[in-house]
Image (tube, rainbow, N blue to C red):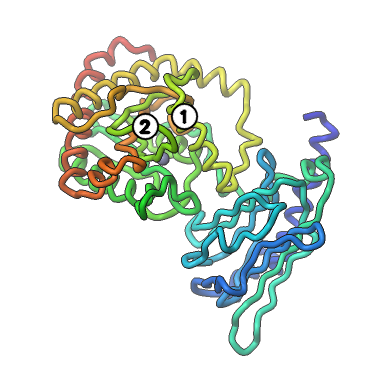
Amino acid sequence: MTGSRRAVAALGRICAALVLALVLGLPGQGGAQDFSGLATVAPGGSEIRDRRGALEVTLSLSQGVPYRIFTLEDPRRLVLDFREVDWRGVDPKVLLNSDIASSVAMGPFRPGWSRMVIEVKEPLALQRADMHVDRESGAALMGARFTPVSAETFAAGAGLPAGSAWDLEPRALPAPARDPDAPLRIMLDPGHGGIDPGAEREGVVEAPLMLTFARELRDLLIRSGAEVFLTRDEDIFVSLEGRVAMAHAAGADLFVSLHADALSSGRALGTTVHTLSREASDEASRLLAERHDRGDLLAGIDLSRSDDEIAGVLMDLARTETQPRSERLADALVLSLRSEGLPLNTRPRRAAGYSVLKAPDVPSVLVELGFLSSKRDRENLLDAAFRARLASALRDGILAWKIADDTLAPLRLK
Ligand SMILES: [Zn+2]
């Protein structure tokens, strides 16, 4: 970006922040104090529709709530954040009645906040937004209108509003110093959550299933003497970069991301264990990695600031040490799953450019416990007894890796 474009973009962000202040009725946090409790959405009075070339969003809410609106690029998205809105009962397919917008997603984002993200085919800018609250009932009608603008105008105005560092955790945190005899510290990462439910098949949803399994695995690992943290312990959205930052900030010894995705083609089944690689081991893994990144984009994460070349070089250096440790962790997990007689995929070890595995200093693997697109895997994962076998095999694999990793520790640099 050139200096002048950067200045224009900065100006756009200030404008976005002003819109925020106006719609919230700020100064300060004052706007939030007038509201309490969780607002529900009446599907009947709510719609996203085209009107004379503009896009109109209408939401019928049980009560007024503070909100903010901003736009993001690549892909072009309109992001509406609301305080305390419960989206249950709203079907995105029914809500979306537009040719300008290609998709809509909504759900919990941060504690106390929920998000709606509308992906649009044309560059649009917010023209007006208002919320009318009925004096008698307290019910609110929120309306926002977006009108076409040039691609340049859209680009200049896109970006997170200033002062809203919700999405990305601080990156360069020094990891806390660890006593070599301290218990093994594990960061478990239940995939997806909140506005991003992950895969869904036959009523089985990946995000809550992964949270259930992560809690079960946590209990088992704690009983083995490990310290265990979860990147999320509720139905909430956490960005991929936020998950990596958490592992780093906690000084975790290892990071295990848990998934059960669905494939649109083929009949993949059984557990697979994935590590980071620039080159994907196969097409299915490449698509999985891409879809996980896309989940972040569709949840309204601004990735425009993530490219920092110098940081990239430093990270590559650290990964040279970490990568073989990640590979051995993945091998240990596969070995343990196999020796327990659990159903593995015919090619259980895979690799791709998973953003969630990019912690430079924490050995990281991603386990696809099974595929929700496979009836057998789905039934297995819904079975608590099967999950218990899976969890104990993963625990055994982690503990075996730890013993081997300790014996190699003196050989490592530092
Ligand atoms: Zn997943």
Quadrant for the N terminus, please.
top right
User: Label 2 amino acid?
Assistant: Leu
Residue located at (62% from left, 74% from top) = 45
Q: Nearer the viewer, residue 327 or 231?
A: 327
**In contact (CB < 8 Å): disc 2 and disc 1:** yes
Q: Which residue is mark 2?
A: 366
Q: Callout 1 environment at 10 Å: few (<14), some (14 to 19), or many (20+)? A: many
Q: Position of residue 15 (x, y in %)?
A: 79, 53
Residue located at (39% from left, 40% from top) = 261
Quadrant for the C terminus, please.
top left
> Which of the 4 quarters of the picture holds residue 97?
bottom right
User: Label 1 amino acid?
Assistant: Tyr
Q: Position of residue 200 (x, y in %)?
A: 41, 49
Q: Which residue is mark 1?
A: 354
Residue located at (21% from left, 28% from top) = 397
Q: Furthest-bottom residue in view?
A: 136
